[in-house]
Amino acid sequence: MSKRIGVLTSGGDCPGLNAVLRGVVHAASRQGWEILGFLDGYEGLLSPVQYRILDSSSTAGIMHLGGTILGTTNKGRFVAKVRHGENATLDPAIIEEAKETFEGLDLDSLICIGGDGSLTTALQLQQAGINTVGVPKTIDNDIEATAITFGFDSAVACVVDALDRLHTTAKSHKRVMVLEVMGRYAGWIALHGGLAGGADIILLPEFPFDLNIICKIIKEREAKGAFNTMVVCAEGACPIDGGFTTKQTNRTGETRLGGVGELVAEAIGDRTGKDTRAVVLGHLQRGGNPTALDRILGTRFGVEAIELIMQGRYGHMVSYQNYRVDAVRMEDAVSHLKQVQQDTQLVDTCKQVGISFGT
Ligand code: F6P
């Protein structure tokens, strides 16, 4: 039976979104189904309704492109995540309008590609009677129900490239370099990027750091003839005697993290006398072309989303576990933040190769 399926990309963009869209379109067209791509996330469902038909020609040559051809937003009327761990309930009038669009366009289901906030929105739509299927997306890799999200590998590759570059200049000038990376309240980007990029110290949101320990390590390294030190600092890293460093709260009430790298660099400079510089990698981590892994994962997730619709498994989210793509119930998946733990194997690996967490 012919079906019309809606798809949208919501929340912060990340490399691999276009690979998902392409995967969705190819798998759907094999069934003879039509795909409508809503523009600018869930906002496209509201008046003036905005969508475009996605077919094999409009999705040709997009897999390697970063960003999303549909546009996205992490603001607006559908934001269902406010601060760390807080969920917001959507305005019933907004849900009703989205439902009218869904029914008016005779859609069978809606594929929602987004992070935990956007998937929380998808769950609320599902509960209101809109058939939804979730596809987890975030560079932060902080969704518990999937071992990995696409976009993460590309972000880590960006961190590693930055560290490779910073290494050479740090070494030449015998400096301490502090690289602040994204990840919100989870330290996965810092942990993976730091290990792969040869960091000496990695500061994570999950392990409050002690500046005395960091400075002691730098001095000990100096005494052994290692005159430069590379510090990777997650934007959500906190000192043992302080909280998150934030920039401002945006209009939706969401806290924006940022600035801790500069604070750490200043403190290191003051306490050790070392020439120290801070670099904020920022949105470079979200932009650019996806890695091969993210292209493959994105394609697999897109194809699986159509498979779930074929099986009538609405209210489920695509997930990756044990080298296989499968699905979990959305309500079991959202709001479980995946964070680095003391017993995370990679933490031990880092320690074994001499990396300190400043603890
Ligand atoms: O969740 C993805 C992410 O890139 C975080 O790592 C970062 O804190 C945040 O989004 C930045 O959001 P914005 O694009 O609104 O500045």
Image (cartoon, rainbow, N blue to C red):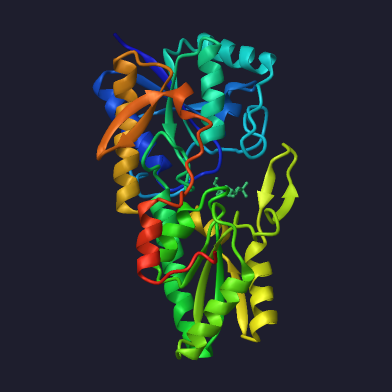
Identify the image quadrant of residue 30.
top left
Residue 193 at x, y percent in the picture: 43, 61
Q: Residue at x 41, y 50 (%)?
A: 343
Q: Residue at x 69, y 19 (%)?
A: 91
Identify the image quadrant of residue 268.
bottom right
Q: Residue at x 26, y 19 (%)?
A: 31
Q: Residue at x 68, y 68 (%)?
A: 263
Looking at the picture, tell me which residue is in the foreground, 77 or 193: 193
Q: Is residue 288 visible?
A: no
Q: Is residue 136 visible?
A: yes
Looking at the picture, tell me which residue is in the foreground, 23 or 310: 310
Residue 168 at x, y percent in the picture: 45, 82
Identify the image quadrant of residue 212.
bottom right
**Quarter occupied by the N terminus:** top left
Total count of labels: 0
Q: Is residue 325 above or below residue 195?
A: above
**Quarter occupied by the C terminus:** bottom right
Residue 53 at x, y percent in the picture: 43, 26
Residue 102 at x, y percent in the picture: 52, 14
| Side of 280 relative to 157 (left or right) | right
| Side of 73 relative to 312 (left or right) | right
Looking at the picture, tell me which residue is in the foreground, 318 or 214: 214
